[in-house]
Amino acid sequence: MPTALLADDEPMMRAALRDHLAMLWPQLQIVAEADDGPSALSALDRTGPDIAFLDIRMPGLTGLEVARATRSKARIVFVTAHDNHAIEAFEANATDYVLKPVAPSRLAKVVAKLRDSLADGLSADAEQLTQLAQMLRQAGAASEAIAQAPSIQWLQVAVGRTIRMVHLNDVLYFESDTKYTRVVSLDCEGLLRMTLKELLDCAGTSAFMQVRRGMAVNRSFIRAVHHIDDTLEIELRGRAERLKVSNAHRPLFKAM
């Protein structure tokens, strides 16, 4: 049975990758997970998986540094959010990549390639990794520029391999996980590579109210606030789920 390691410091990204792999490759056994570079290196050398899915940017060590330092012969699949110019150059090499947010269609091609190459022992050498690191550093400036924008009205939301344009007024709520924010509207759910703080700062609007750490709701979509014992739950128009309000943010909603 083939085995794999997943390393990503963002829990939502790691969970999405895990779920997609379970659907596309049920026989693949996840033998270890890590949320930083040193833990990934230790788990990689300890478990010796056939495949290692490594985030490019992780605390402690990058995925590139982990790949250079490991004694494992695992096939390395890099997970990256950088632009396609660096990715296309990298794709010509022996290893592969998965572009964040994880798209099942792209991952299906990676899985097919991995299945075919398990007997070939393909790996990236140090020179290839160094070249990729240089390209990704150059591409990183472009991918992070959006966080410096002074004000935005339209969001470019990644839904699988599609980029959806979502207006701020149509967003029901944001849910942030480290560097990514889940954007939920009435007809769209996707990911944006910005923290919640960066997003709200760029939005320059008071329409969003903090529900708890990492979550903000559009006040125009609040249908009701339910007082249940010592908790508050927000009911939204057009959505079945309710958003629980943390104790720190309860004063904002008590009057509703």
Image (cartoon, rainbow, N blue to C red):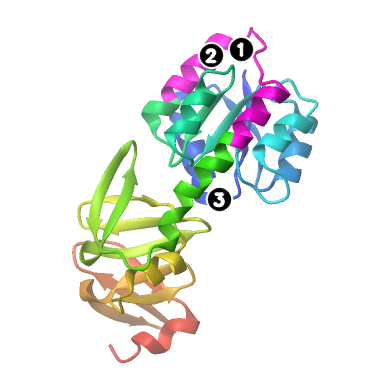
Residue 10 circle label: 3
Asked which quadrant contains residue 151, the reply is: bottom left
- Type of amino acid under label 1: Leu
Badge 2 element: helix
Instruction: Answer above or below: position of 34 versus 176.
Output: above
Q: Position of residue 141 (x, y in %)?
A: 50, 49
Closer-to-camera residue (67/6): 67
Instruction: Answer above or below: position of 142 versus 97.
Output: below
From where the camera sits, is residue 204 visible?
yes
Specify start and end residues of the magenta stretch as a single range. 108-134
- Figure quadrant of the N terminus: top right
**Whole-Å distance between the Cαs marked 2 and 3?**
26 Å
Labels 2 & 1 near each other (Cβ < 8 A): yes
Q: Position of residue 84 (x, y in %)?
A: 43, 33
Residue designated by label 1: 118
Residue at (44, 27) in percent of width and height: 107
Q: Position of residue 62 (x, y in %)?
A: 67, 42
